[in-house]
Image (tube, rainbow, N blue to C red):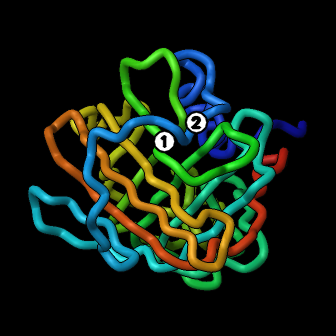
Amino acid sequence: MIKKNYFGYIFLTFFGILSILSAGCSNENAGDSISRFEFDFDLNDHFSIEETAELFKTDRAYIDANYEEWAKNFIHFHDGEIGDSLVLGCWGNWLGYIQNPSASVKIWFPQTNLEDGIYQYSRTAALNDFSIRIEKNMQWGEYVSSWGTFEGSNTILNSEVVASARNTSNNSVVVEYAEIKLENINTSNSEIRYVIETSNGHLIKGSFTGLLEDFKLRTPEIDCD
């Protein structure tokens, strides 16, 4: 029986529909909000956790500008490398990484067209401009099920969630408030800066300057039995 890829379903639903739409409708006319943060920083393609003074490189940036109906634009910063597409298989097995990342920032925008300006997310808002998830210390390898069957050669075996717009097993990293500033978007010198406040009081800042490389993120329906 062909069924929806379980991890693909979680990826799409848990971090997308629920995080953007559960608080209300998405904001198509975003970008003109008044910021409550100062964006006068440049972390040179890294993100930082200010309370721990940790710094993580995310020097590659990819965009799928026609992702799904509920999230038209998907941006992925990390320290790995992707070919022209990234395909999610059974049990979290990823195909398409030329080099696996160890740190990752994923941002889902419901807007059809991204423009320069300020985009905002609030856990309590009735309207949000984006959803975001940040991970560090990602460990990759072969996944073997509890039945001893080999399920995939390139699976995320472990990672630490730094911030997530949805509840996780560690609710202290849930995003309370966040802002993203876009400048020169859709050019070879795009500037993207973001600031995030989490439930545990941590402040996370990140920036990227350069070209957003086009790619396609695919989560096909496959038989995972």
Q: Residue at x 72, y 66 (%)?
A: 86
Q: CA distance from mark 1 to mark 2?
A: 6 Å
Mark 1 residue element:
strand
Asked if residue 65 lies left or right of residue 24, the reply is right
Report the disc number at residue 119: 1
Q: Count of labels shown?
A: 2
How many neighbours does mark 2 have within 10 angstroms: few (below 14), some (14-19), or many (20 or more)? many
N-terminal label among 1 and 2? 2
Which residue type carries mark 1?
Tyr
Residue annotated with mark 2: 30
- Badge 1 vs badge 2, beta-carbon distance below 8 Å: yes
Quick check: 210 above or below 47?
below
Q: Residue at x 73, y 59 (%)?
A: 64
Which residue type carries mark 2?
Ala
State whether residue 225 appears in this view.
Answer: no
Asked if residue 91 lies left or right of residue 87, the reply is left
Q: Quadrant of the N terminus?
A: top right
Residue 210, horizontal then vertical, whole percent? 55, 78
Q: Residue at x 66, y 72 (%)?
A: 187
